[in-house]
Image (spheres, grey):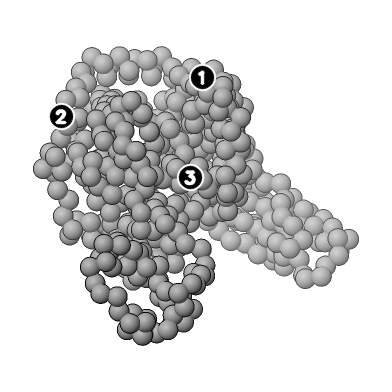
């Protein structure tokens, strides 16, 4: 049924990948290709009536029975349009291939109910992408095949060592195709250029605005701000239970190692979805109260949610935190010596405890970094030196201890029966300089980017409202 999306607006965010029809071959005597059957059916009964009735042998040279069954599950979406957007067809195969790409990015299994929801979002995303490409074409904005191919090769270089054929094979193996990824690339280029023509030239930020922001930053010096990633899903009283269930399912996938940006692009209804849910650094006071309270208790790398906020639910991931205009102590560059003692295979806990005691005594006897090798050699321990490692690059649980150490001191021993025991000896530290305030030009750029993003969201909404979309 056709509908103006102004009266029935179907919204979404941007997604990944489309289309390859697998050729269906038949085993003679058992089945006929569904594609061939469709071609025959397309001729219709009138075509049969126009011809004289052929002899049984001529009309059926292979002796195929009149009544037979096709084996295997048929999928009408392979040949049937799922949506027609201003005349452009989006097929079920397009949806399948984009869905498969998302599933591959997610690196996990999802339930049947979640898969249905994902397919719905993928369709909405494909509709958005189609509208974006159409709008660019109306403005005579083109993206050449050479540009798309070059970007495709760049992706292959980043992920497959420059082996384009390997990336082709990977896409096919997960149920996608090179053509569908190239279509995705074309859409992103077209939309970016359209925004550059229709929105960016009309965004103006004055120096006075930037100076006001700078003053507020200086007034907030020392306060904490948090680098948050979010997945926001709208909910009403009627849909809240289902949205919570979906959010918990997403969180389970994320805990199993799924990509947060990939899920944010697919599921989030926030304007940050296009950036993989990246909200950037924010102060708690700029967040809804429920999010502000939650983020204050979160540790870097922690996932939390779903949190009920006005209008829906949100999943949050704390990527980092810092103090405004202050040096981040985790940017300190350390000179370390790692002293380690391996345990033989099959060692008992009692034997390991004895070796551990000897290791502790050795560490306590070290008289500065220059003495580490001598002390370690006495009990068969190894020493590895690293002169350029930032605190933030160390395991999260070690960072607080390293920040408290003085030069010449060592951490508490850590390890396991399998990995042995080790300590880190601090031999030097270059503390970071105080973080300077951003320049006026940098602030202007940030404000412009934020306003362009907000205007782009409204522009996308207008494209949906003006579109004629026919659903099957």
Quarter of the image for the C terminus: give it: top left
Viewer-nearest residue: 393 or 384: 393
Q: Say whether disc 2 or disc 3 marks the residue closer to the N-terminus.
A: 3
The answer to the question of whether label 2 and label 3 lie on touching residues, with beta carbons closer than 8 A, is no
Question: Residue, x 46% and y 46% (percent of image)?
Answer: 119
Q: Which mark is residue 118?
A: 3
Q: Are marks 2 and 1 in contact (CB under 8 Å)?
A: no
- From mark 1 to mark 3, how far is it between C-alphas? 24 Å
Q: Are marks 1 and 3 in contact (CB under 8 Å)?
A: no
Q: Nearer the viewer, residue 452 or 270?
A: 270
Circle 2 is placed at which residue position? 201
The reply, left or right, for residue 307 in relation to residue 215 is right
Residue at x-position 77% and y-position 70%: 344
Q: Residues within 10 Å of mark 3 (few under 14, many from 20)?
A: many
* Residue farthest to the left, as pictured: 140
Residue 345: percent from left, percent from top: 77, 71
Is residue 235 or residue 300 the one in the foreground? 235
Q: Residue at x 25, y 34 (%)?
A: 467
């Amino acid at each position: 049924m056709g509908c103006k999306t102004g009266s029935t607006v179907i919204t979404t965010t941007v997604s990944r990948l489309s289309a390859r029809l697998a050729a269906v071959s038949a085993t003679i005597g058992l089945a006929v290709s569904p594609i061939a059957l469709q071609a025959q059916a397309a001729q219709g009964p009138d075509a049969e009536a126009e011809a004289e009735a052929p002899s049984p042998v001529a009309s059926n040279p292979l002796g195929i029975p009149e009544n037979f069954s096709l084996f295997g599950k048929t999928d009408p979406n392979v040949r049937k349009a799922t949506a027609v957007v201003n005349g452009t067809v989006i097929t079920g195969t397009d949806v399948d291939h984009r869905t498969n790409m998302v599933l591959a990015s997610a690196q996990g299994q999802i339930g049947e109910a979640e898969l249905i929801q994902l397919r719905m979002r993928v369709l909405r995303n494909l509709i958005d992408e189609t509208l974006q490409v159409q709008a660019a074409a109306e403005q005579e904005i083109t993206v050449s095949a050479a540009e798309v191919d070059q970007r495709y090769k760049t992706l292959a270089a980043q992920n497959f060592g420059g082996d384009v054929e390997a990336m082709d094979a990977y896409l096919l193996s997960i149920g996608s195709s090179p053509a569908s990824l190239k279509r995705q690339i074309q859409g992103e280029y077209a939309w970016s250029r359209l925004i550059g023509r229709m929105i960016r030239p009309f965004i103006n930020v004055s120096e006075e605005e930037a100076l006001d922001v700078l003053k507020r930053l200086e007034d907030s010096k020392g306060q904490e701000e948090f680098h948050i990633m979010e997945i926001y899903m709208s909910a009403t009283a009627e849909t809240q239970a289902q949205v919570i269930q979906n959010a918990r399912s997403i969180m389970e996938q994320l805990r199993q190692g799924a990509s947060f940006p990939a899920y944010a692009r697919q599921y989030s209804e926030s304007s940050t979805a296009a950036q993989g849910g990246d909200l950037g650094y924010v102060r708690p006071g700029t967040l809804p109260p429920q999010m502000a309270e939650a983020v204050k208790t979160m540790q870097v790398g922690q996932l939390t949610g779903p949190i009920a906020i006005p209008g829906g639910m949100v999943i949050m991931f704390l990527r980092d935190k810092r103090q405004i205009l202050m040096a981040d102590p985790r940017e300190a560059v350390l000179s370390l010596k790692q002293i380690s003692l391996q345990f033989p295979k099959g060692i008992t806990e009692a034997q390991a405890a004895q070796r551990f005691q000897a290791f502790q005594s050795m560490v306590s006897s070290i008289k500065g970094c220059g003495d580490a090798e001598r002390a370690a050699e006495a009990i068969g321990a190894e020493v590895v030196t690293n002169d350029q490692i930032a605190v933030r690059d160390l395991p999260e649980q070690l960072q607080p201890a390293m920040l408290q150490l003085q030069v010449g001191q060592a951490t508490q021993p850590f390890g396991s029966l399998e990995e042995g025991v080790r300590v880190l000896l601090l031999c030097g530290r270059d503390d970071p300089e105080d973080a300077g305030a951003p320049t006026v030009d940098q602030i202007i750029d940030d404000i412009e980017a934020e306003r362009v993003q907000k205007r782009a969201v409204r522009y996308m909404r207008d494209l949906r409202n003006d579109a004629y979309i026919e659903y099957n």
